[in-house]
Amino acid sequence: MKNLLFTTPELLLPEKAAIVGSSGILIASKYGKLIDSFDCVVRFNRAPTIGFEEDVGSKTDIYVVNNHVFTNQEISGSGWTSEHYPTQPQFFVRDLKNTNIYCIGQDLPSYSEVHRHTSISNGVFYFDYSQMECIRNEFGFAANLGVGTCFIILCILSNVEVSLFGIDMADRRRDHYWEERPPAGPCHNISNEKAVLNKLSIDKMVHINV
């Protein structure tokens, strides 16, 4: 087992993990059985599995979420509201049971208050966001990372071998395998994140399933 760096409390991961993104490239991929064969399966924010098991699997060991998802805020911004996300229920985290939740964000509630937002049956873990600048500098990121890329980098730093599914490396508008979505917000540089991940794949530090 590997201790995931910059994490409170301690989180141990197997030596190999499947990290499942939300891209539409998973449609008709039939990766479900392969994903579920991993000892640890990681998904992001409110990504569903029901109805998509053949392509994305059904097993989830960790949900990695941003601060808005963790605190059960309604989706909004750029004219998009929860009406545009019928398959992303606002209280997804509140209603989760018996899983692990890994939170990445700058404005998270104090750790003593985590179970105001989700069930006490869940394990809740926080990323030390003060390490973000060091990670950016070490890997050449141009902006603070989205939760997916951040967790991938933490696994690399912690010597966890990661296989990526549903992480679209093409420089194009993002989509989800279960819904339409608006463009990425201004706080992330998605093209730069993809470029760095592509380089890490070339250097055999991650394995990208396409």
Image (cartoon, rainbow, N blue to C red):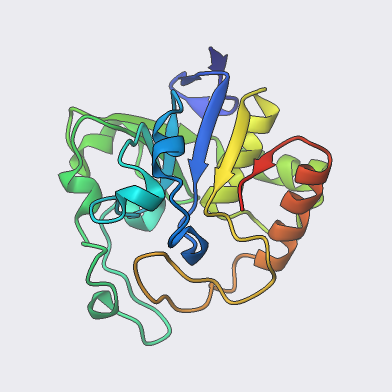
Q: Residue at x 46, y 27 (%)?
A: 38
Q: Residue at x 29, y 30 (%)?
A: 112
Quadrant assignment, res 64? top left
Q: Which residue occupies 32% across, 36% down? A: 59
Residue occupying the point 52% across, 29% down: 17
Q: Is residue 113 left or right of residue 77?
A: left
Residue at the far bottom: name it: 79
- Number of marks in picture: 0
Query: In the rendered image, which quarter is residue 28 located in?
Result: bottom left
The answer to whether residue 64 is visible is no
The residue nearer to you, when weighing 122 against 126, is 122
Whether residue 207 is visible to the viewer of this picture, yes or no, is yes
For the residue pair 2 and 74, the one nearer the viewer reads as 2
Q: In the displayed structure, would residue 100 be above or below residue 144?
A: above
Image coords of residue 86 (percent x, y): 22, 72
Q: Is residue 144 left or right of residue 200?
A: left
Residue 152, percent across and down? 60, 40
**Residue 93 position (above or below residue 14):** below
Image location of residue 83, percent across then percent down: 23, 79
Q: Is residue 203 above or below residue 147?
A: above
**What x and y, as percent, mark residue 49?**
29, 50
Looking at the image, which residue sits at the far top?
1
